[in-house]
Image (spheres, grey):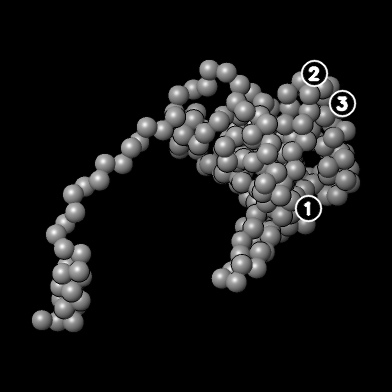
């Protein structure tokens, strides 16, 4: 008997006969919402990740939204997707990323902030979902700059993760953002900005 066979035989003796299959319930809440999602829960969950939510009442004018975006960008170099609504483009040093003229990673690294729309927000996890749709840009644009300003409406919120994935197209390039990028080593030393922006501001309209 080889060493491998000896080890496997010992494992089989230890665990005994094969256990019966365990039925795992899959009764996730996938149904579409019949009313508005819990916006307060979304805000609380986002802020637990050390991100910031800026609540904007319904009826806020485009000029007021523009002023808020300018305040968040604070005059630093920024990049926006080519199809971001004009009133959300900050003033000052702004570069435009488009399918016909994509910015190189080195160029994206020289800007501080990216401003985009979002596709969905998930209340229970405080996550923002992007799918490279209108106003969201490609994935690199939202991962390289150090600061991400993402604009969502209350109507884009869902309560649960299954509801979100039921509403999303699985063949699109999905990015799920739960707070600023962060990681830690075995000693739990937290390092921010490793895999994406170090700072996340969510503008929630409605």
Residue 46, given in percent of the width and then of the height, sits at: 67, 42
| Residue drawn at point x = 52 percent, y = 42 percent | 173
Please tell me how crowded label 1 is: few (under 14), some (14-19), or many (20+) other residues with Cα within 10 Å: some
Locate residue 154 relative to residue 22 in the image: left or right: right
Residue 186, given in percent of the width and then of the height, sits at: 56, 71
- The mark closer to the camera, 2 or 1, is 2
Q: Quadrant of the N terminus?
A: bottom left
- Earlier-in-chain disc, 2 versus 1: 2
Work out whether residue 115 or residue 108 is closer to the camera in this orientation and state it: 115
Please tell me how crowded label 3 is: few (under 14), some (14-19), or many (20+) other residues with Cα within 10 Å: few
Residue 52, compared with residue 186, is above or below; it is above
Work out whether residue 141 or residue 25 is closer to the camera in this orientation and state it: 25
Residue 132 visible in the shown view: no
| Residue drawn at point x = 64 percent, y = 41 percent | 45
Residue 31 visible in the shown view: yes
Q: Secondary structure at mark 1?
A: loop
Please tell me how crowded label 2 is: few (under 14), some (14-19), or many (20+) other residues with Cα within 10 Å: few
Residue 3, given in percent of the width and then of the height, sits at: 18, 82
Q: Using the image, tell me which numbered label, if any, was put on residue 111.
A: 1
Q: Secondary structure at mark 3?
A: helix
Name the residue that disc number 2 marks. 59
Name the residue that disc number 3 marks. 63
């Amino acid at each position: 008997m080889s060493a491998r066979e000896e080890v496997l035989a010992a494992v089989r003796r230890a665990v005994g006969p094969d256990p019966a299959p365990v039925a795992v319930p899959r009764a996730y809440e996938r149904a579409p919402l019949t009313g508005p999602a819990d916006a307060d829960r979304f805000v609380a969950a986002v802020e637990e990740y050390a991100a910031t939510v800026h609540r904007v009442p319904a009826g806020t004018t485009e000029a007021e939204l523009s002023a808020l975006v300018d305040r968040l960008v604070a005059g630093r170099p920024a990049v926006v997707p080519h199809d971001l609504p004009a009133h959300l483009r900050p003033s000052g040093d702004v570069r435009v990323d488009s399918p016909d003229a994509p910015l190189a990673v080195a160029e994206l690294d020289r800007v501080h902030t990216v401003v985009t729309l979002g596709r969905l927000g998930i209340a229970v996890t405080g996550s923002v979902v992007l799918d490279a749709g209108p106003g969201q840009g490609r994935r690199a644009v939202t991962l390289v700059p150090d600061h991400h300003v993402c604009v969502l409406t209350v109507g884009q919120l869902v309560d649960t993760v299954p509801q979100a994935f039921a509403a999303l197209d699985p063949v699109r390039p999905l990015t799920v953002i739960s707070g600023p990028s962060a990681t830690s080593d075995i000693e739990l030393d937290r390092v921010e900005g490793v895999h994406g922006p170090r700072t996340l501001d969510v503008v929630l309209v409605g």
